[in-house]
Amino acid sequence: MPERDSETVTEETVRVRRSPRYARFMIVGAVFFVIVAFVLTYSLPQGQGYDRNAVFGYLALVAIAVGLGLGAVVALAFDRRSSRRAATVAADRVGVHSPEAEADGGPGEAVTASDSAGDVPTDPPQDASPHDDDPR
């Protein structure tokens, strides 16, 4: 009969806070400034020798850069603000140790599903082709 895995539970205090998603802020900033560039391009009178679409293209490139930068700055400001509101809570850390792993790999080494599943094949079957869906 195999020995049971030993489980250790330790209580720790951790800080929990909300964090903004930087990419979303940057994308929203870029889209907002592209819309501003569009409105500016088509609401002001057309200049001599410049096509409106070309003007919009150049303004859009600048607007995207400015929007990405300002979106990142706004996300950083929200991140700073959320760090002030961080809460400290108690959390349990659970560690599972297998006697077999300790004997094989040393103390404190946990057994994962991939370690204990030695009979699971890692290669795909030989008759399977990656292009089975190809109608050729």
Image (cartoon, rainbow, N blue to C red):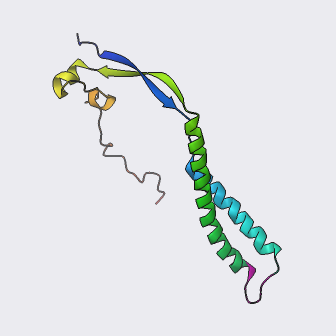
Decide which of 31, 15 is in the foreground and name it.
15
Q: Is residue 64 visible?
A: yes
Decide which of 24, 78 is in the foreground and name it.
78
Image coords of residue 68 (percent x, y): 59, 60
Residue at point 56% right, 44% down?
Answer: 80
Drawn side of residue 47 relative to residue 2, left or right: right
Location of the N terminus (image quadrant): top left
Image coords of residue 39 (percent x, y): 78, 68
Image coords of residue 2 (percent x, y): 23, 13
Residue at point 32% right, 21% down?
Answer: 96
Residue at point 33% right, 16% down?
Answer: 7
* Residue 10 highlighted magenta (yes or no): no
Drawn side of residue 130 relative to residue 46, left or right: left
Residue at the extreme bottom: 49
Residue 44 falls in image quadrant: bottom right
Q: Is residue 20 visible?
A: no
Q: Is residue 57 above or below residue 19?
A: below
* Residue 49 highlighted magenta (yes or no): yes
Residue at the extreme front: 84
Drawn side of residue 131 relative to residue 84, left or right: left
Total marks shown come to 0
Residue at point 58% right, 60% down?
Answer: 69
Q: Is residue 80 above or below residue 134?
A: above
Residue 119 falls in image quadrant: top left
Kindly report the secondary structure that dominates the magenta region of the rendered protein: loop
Q: Is residue 48 above or below residue 106?
A: below
Magenta range: 46-52
Residue 67 falls in image quadrant: bottom right
